[in-house]
């Protein structure tokens, strides 16, 4: 399939004797928005960290355009410039301004000159509504603003895929909407995304496929109308019933 970007094959991850991921299989094609849902501790964040090579899988393959990224000789920082990550806790550099946060990766990893990095950073900060804050330090920003800067920083690297690890779970409720709105715009522009989320409305309305994980395995996956609207597995039904009753 020409537009397939990522293929996860038989991926497993253990920490000592504790197996967190078991035989995970799924694919990501260009323009897909994949929502990964499941209870806390089901392995969702570990899966993203393996895909981004922040954790080394115990077994299995992560194919990026057909090349196994778990093999020897892979340049992880270069790969991460194509498969970017937005973290739950923002991970901004506290001692750098908003603008510099969005420039440093471009200059170090992509070897862009300062002017080009600045122009690119400004473009994406404008896109996420953070251009007025370019000289601010992270401590001067709200959680929602920090997360929008983190998204701009990831976009400035020109990724083909963006991974979001519970991007709204550290935010106050009134700030969740501003970050989801940015993500919704990215989806509308055709950005390929994998989103670990508890925001079921986002999973239902924005994603093209939903992956439900339970105890380290994929229990159910498919279009949102199928997984969220007509789940086949009892575990999925039990998980979703918590949201329907709330």
Image: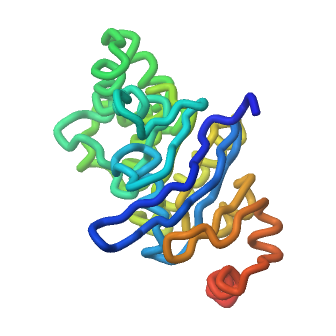
The vertical placement of 65 against 54, above or below, is above
Outermost residue to the left: 95
Tell which of 168 and 177 is nearer to you: 168
Name the residue: 62% across, 87% down. 242
Specify whether 44 is left or right of 3.
left
The vertical placement of 192 against 122, above or below, is below
Tell which of 94 and 88 is nearer to you: 88
The picture places residue 206, in percent across and down from the top left corner, at: 71, 54
Name the residue: 54% across, 62% down. 23
The quadrant of the image that shows the C terminus is bottom right
Residue 167 shows up from this direction: no
Name the residue: 50% across, 35% down. 68
Name the residue: 49% across, 51% down. 60
Residue 78 shows up from this direction: yes
Specify whether 218 is left or right of 87.
right
The picture places residue 166, in percent across and down from the top left corner, at: 47, 61
The vertical placement of 107 against 229, above or below, is above
Q: Count how many numbered circles sit on residues in the image.
A: 0
Specify whether 113 is left or right of 86.
left
């Amino acid at each position: 399939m020409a537009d397939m970007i990522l293929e996860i094959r038989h991926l497993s991850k253990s920490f000592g004797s504790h197996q967190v991921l078991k035989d995970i299989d799924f694919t990501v094609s260009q323009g897909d928005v994949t929502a990964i849902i499941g209870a806390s501790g089901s392995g969702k964040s570990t899966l993203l960290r393996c895909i981004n090579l922040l954790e080394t899988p115990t077994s299995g393959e992560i194919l990026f355009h057909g090349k196994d990224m778990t093999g020897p000789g892979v340049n992880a920082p270069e790969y991460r410039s194509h498969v970017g990550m937005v973290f739950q806790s923002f991970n901004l550099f506290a001692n750098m301004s908003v603008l510099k946060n969005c420039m440093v990766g471009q200059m170090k990893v992509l070897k862009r000159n300062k002017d080009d990095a600045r122009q690119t950073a400004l473009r994406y900060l404008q896109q996420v509504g953070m251009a007025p804050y370019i000289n601010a330090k992270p401590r001067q920003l709200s959680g929602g603003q920090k997360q929008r800067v983190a998204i701009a920083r990831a976009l400035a690297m020109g990724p083909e895929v963006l991974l979001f690890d519970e991007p709204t779970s550290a935010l106050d409720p009134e700030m969740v909407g501003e970050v989801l709105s940015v993500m919704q715009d990215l989806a509308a522009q055709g950005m390929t995304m994998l989103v670990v989320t508890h925001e079921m409305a986002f999973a239902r309305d924005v994603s093209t496929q939903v992956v439900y994980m339970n105890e380290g395995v994929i229990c159910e996956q498919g279009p949102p109308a199928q997984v969220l609207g007509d789940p086949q597995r009892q575990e999925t039904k039990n998980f979703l019933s918590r949201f329907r009753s709330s």
